[in-house]
Image: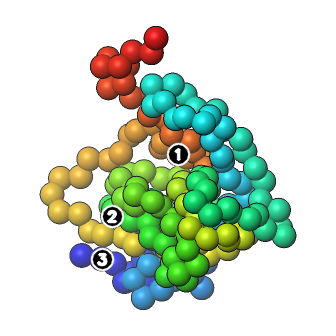
């Protein structure tokens, strides 16, 4: 079951959902808009080796905007701290953003229940596109889970700003594919 906009507002007021700062003007019929933070991360390594921590460059998005090149990839984040211990958040591109050729989450749209922090956007532009800090870039829906709830306690908990991949910390890579 997806929550309606008015129910999202009620849950924010009751602390069932975290959206900080909360702007009621960002509510939609069944979602809330998320805005782009002030920085992006770009990977510096030519090849991403999941066994090794990746080097990134942090770029402040100028008020005049930042041009995303076609087929370029970077990481941004929501200005809002969002999440819930009662509902499952899912991040989506706004249709206007998608129609401008920007993928906002590439593949990772599900936010685990219990994860609360800034959402990292995986930005992939298909066209030359200028992004601006504070622009409404994405929207989040909230879903009622069925069954026992196990809260997220993973490595991205409490994210502040965009977060690079931390896949190199997964025990899977360490045990099956040692570096060297």
Q: Quick one: quadrant of the N terminus?
A: bottom left
Residue 138 position within the rendered picture, expressed as x and y whole percent measured from the top left: 53, 71
Residue 129 position within the rendered picture, expressed as x and y whole percent measured from the top left: 67, 71
Judged from this view, the residue extending furthest toward the bottom is 29
Q: How far apart are the two marked residues, 3 and 2, measured between alpha carbons?
A: 9 Å
**In this figure, which residue is indicated by the disc labeled 1?**
158
| Label 1: element kind | loop
Answer with mark 3 or mark 1, whichever residue precedes in sequence.
3
Judged from this view, the residue extending furthest toward the top is 180
What residue is drawn where x is 36% and y is 70%? 142
Residue 157 visible, this orientation? yes
What residue is drawn where x is 44% and y is 78%? 31
Asked if marks 2 and 1 touch (Cβ < 8 Å), the reply is no
Neighbor class of circle 2 (other Cα within 10 Å; few <14, some 14-19, many 20+) is many
What residue is drawn where x is 51% and y is 25%? 52
Residue 80 visible, this orientation? no
Q: Is residue 131 left or right of residue 46?
A: right
Neighbor class of circle 1 (other Cα within 10 Å; few <14, some 14-19, many 20+) is some
| Label 2: element kind | loop
**In this figure, which residue is indicated by the disc labeled 3?**
2
Answer with mark 2 or mark 1, whichever residue precedes in sequence.
2
Answer with mark 3 or mark 2, whichever residue precedes in sequence.
3
Residue 170 position within the rendered picture, expressed as x and y whole percent measured from the top left: 39, 28
Q: Is residue 118 left or right of residue 105?
A: right
Q: How far apart are the two marked residues, 2 and 1, measured between alpha carbons?
A: 17 Å
What residue is drawn where x is 67% and y is 69%? 128
Q: Which label was assigned to residue 4?
A: none
Q: Which label was assigned to residue 87?
A: 2
Up the image or down, 29 lies above or below 34; here it is below
Up the image or down, 127 lies above or below 116; here it is below
Residue 92 position within the rendered picture, expressed as x and y whole percent measured from the top left: 44, 70
Neighbor class of circle 3 (other Cα within 10 Å; few <14, some 14-19, many 20+) is some
């Amino acid at each position: 079951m997806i929550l309606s906009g008015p129910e999202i507002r009620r849950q924010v007021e009751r602390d069932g959902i975290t959206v900080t700062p909360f702007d009621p003007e960002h509510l939609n019929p069944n979602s809330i808009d998320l805005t782009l933070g002030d920085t992006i991360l770009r990977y510096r390594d030519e090849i991403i080796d999941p066994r090794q921590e990746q080097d990134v460059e942090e770029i402040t998005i100028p008020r005049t905007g930042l041009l995303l090149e076609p087929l370029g990839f970077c990481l941004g984040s929501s200005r809002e701290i969002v999440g819930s211990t009662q509902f499952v958040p899912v991040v989506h591109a706004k249709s206007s953003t998608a129609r401008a050729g920007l993928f906002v989450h590439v593949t990772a749209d599900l936010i685990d229940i219990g994860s609360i922090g800034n959402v990292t956007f995986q930005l992939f532009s298909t066209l030359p596109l200028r992004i601006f800090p504070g622009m409404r870039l994405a929207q989040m829906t909230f879903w009622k889970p069925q069954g026992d709830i196990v809260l997220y306690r993973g490595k991205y908990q409490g994210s502040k700003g965009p977060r690079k991949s931390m896949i190199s910390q997964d025990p899977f890579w360490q045990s099956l594919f040692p570096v060297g």
